[in-house]
Image: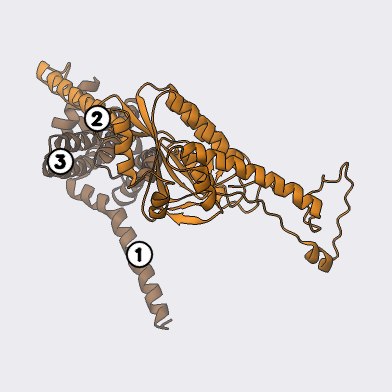
Amino acid sequence: MEGEPDVSKKLVVGLVIIFLLVMGILSIKSAGKSASAGSGTGNDKVGVIEISGTLAETGSSSMLTASGSDAEKIMETIRDAAERKDIKALVLRINSPGGTSVAAQEVGVELDRFRKSGKPIVTSMGDVCASGGYWVACSSDRIVANPSTLTGSIGVIMEFSNLEGLYGKIGVREEVIKSGAYKDIGSSSRQLTPEERELLQGLVNDSYAQFLDQVSQGRKGKMSRAEIVKIADGRVISGRQAKQLGLVDDLGNYYEALDIARKMADMDKDSPVEVLNKPGVWDSLLADVQARRLLPQQNYWRLSY
Amino acid sequence: MWSDILYGVLFEPRVTLRRLAEERPLAPALFTFLIIIIFNLVIYRGLILQQQYALDGVEAFLWLYQIIGALFSCCMLFVMAGLFSLLSELLFNKTNASGLLVCFSFAALPGILGPALYYSASIIGLPWLGITCSIVVGVWLLVLQILSLTEALDISVGQAIALFILPGLLILVGLVVIILIFALSGLGIK
């Protein structure tokens, strides 16, 4: 360190710094590529949206559904994908037993809008893609299932608990002041009246008809409405059975679904894939915390697919 | 000045570390250490993602793990400087905590080369070369830390090595004592 460093010292230090800078830049680029999970090098990408667990609206999740998919976030991701020019096709990776009717409908409508942009959607079914999960799948151009995927369960359910007997045993009696005959419909302190049952059955029937409309629309040209009605009794079927019946188009795994999406969008075979709704650090942390939440949020009755 | 120190630490470490221990440029030293930490954070991220160690869940937490690791390294720098200075005072009656802090900070300089060399070797498809470079850099770091102790505390190499392994030795002895206590209580010997 005597006086100014000579030229050779400066040169060595300069070369070291340049080497480090080059490595740093390469590393950042490499990390960016890996984050997009793509193997290819082209600009066009296949976007993947993962729908896992019970599908529900924001804030309506209970202890059981907290680890599911948030419909609002999924819709936002679909909209972003529609606006992005580099996303040429979408693959829905569904692993869901269903969810609330509104959540499934909202996601379905947003997918239909996406398809109007001319970009194809392919559904890849995971372990389970039933009920509301199948509703969403019907808004895609092609459905790919694994042979042992559990699917179907086309139907609507509304459940109430009648705790009248228990309340009687512990001496609880509910006093109700209401403005109309049906205002306390579904109350846990008494049995449903025949009129209430009829009213709710009508509601379920209407929702069921909407489900049939969605499936008929999604399987247009592949299944008639009569054929759908025949199996739309809530039964769960395997992916292979679903293929035989016409509820799915192909049997295959996630990668085959990606290949089909690439083919439909006229993309290169190795075009990269980007998972569009990958959870961030805090999402992953909160998901774990929420899944173990002890007290459910506000509990109200609703229709579920 | 900075390029002079950089060159000196890499190629003339003894003279440079002695000068640093006397002058104690604390701010440049800590700044240099921070640069090393941040640079390594970026390189390691690239390395991990390139080699696809990171599955989906891990990738989401990678930044968190790395930031915790970086904070731990910063804490360890201060702990090491303080601890070795204290032990040296007890054993050799010589102390220079701030000089040690400065020397340890600059002695970490080769640490910036290790991951970068490993990364460049993995890019050109020679992972064995990367591993060799990492081992060499590891030894280099160890030598520089010993030299930091000798120059900052003005002690011999033997004393520095003894000082360097002392904390580990104490932990080892402590562990053996604890194990022995449990083993003896398990045998019913009081």
Q: Position of residue A293 (x, y in %)?
A: 59, 51
Determine which quarter of the picture holds residue A238: bottom left
In the rendering, what colour is chain B?
brown
Instruction: Look at label 3 and name its amino acid.
Output: Gly
* Colour given to chain A in the rendered image: orange
- Amino acid type, residue under disc 2 in the picture: Asp
Report x, y in % for residue A42.
25, 26
The residue at 24%/29% (across/down) is A268
Residue in front for this viewpoint, A161 or A73: A161
Q: Earlier in the sequence, mark 1 or mark 3?
A: 3
Disc 2: CA contacts within 10 A as few (<14), some (14-19) or many (>=20): some
How much space separates mark 1 and mark 2, taking CA atoms? 60 Å
Category of crowding for the residue at label 3, using alpha-carbon neighbours closer than 10 angstroms: few (below 14), some (14–19), many (at least 20): many
**Residue marked by disc 1:** B175
Query: The numbered mark 1 sits on a residue in which chain?
Result: B
Indicate the position of residue B102 as horizontal and vertical percent values.
30, 33
Query: Camera-side residue: B18 or B165?
Result: B165
A298 or A116, nearer to the observer: A116
**How far is mark 1 from mark 3, CA to CA?**
35 Å
Query: In which quadrant of the rendered image does the N terminus of chain A lie?
Result: top left
Q: Amino acid at mark 1?
A: Leu
Q: CA–CA distance between discs 3 and 2?
A: 34 Å
Residue B79 or A253: which is nearer the viewer?
A253
Determine whether label 1 and label 2 are within 8 Å by CB. no
Name the disc covering residue B130, or none: 3
Q: Are discs 1 and 3 both within one chain?
A: yes
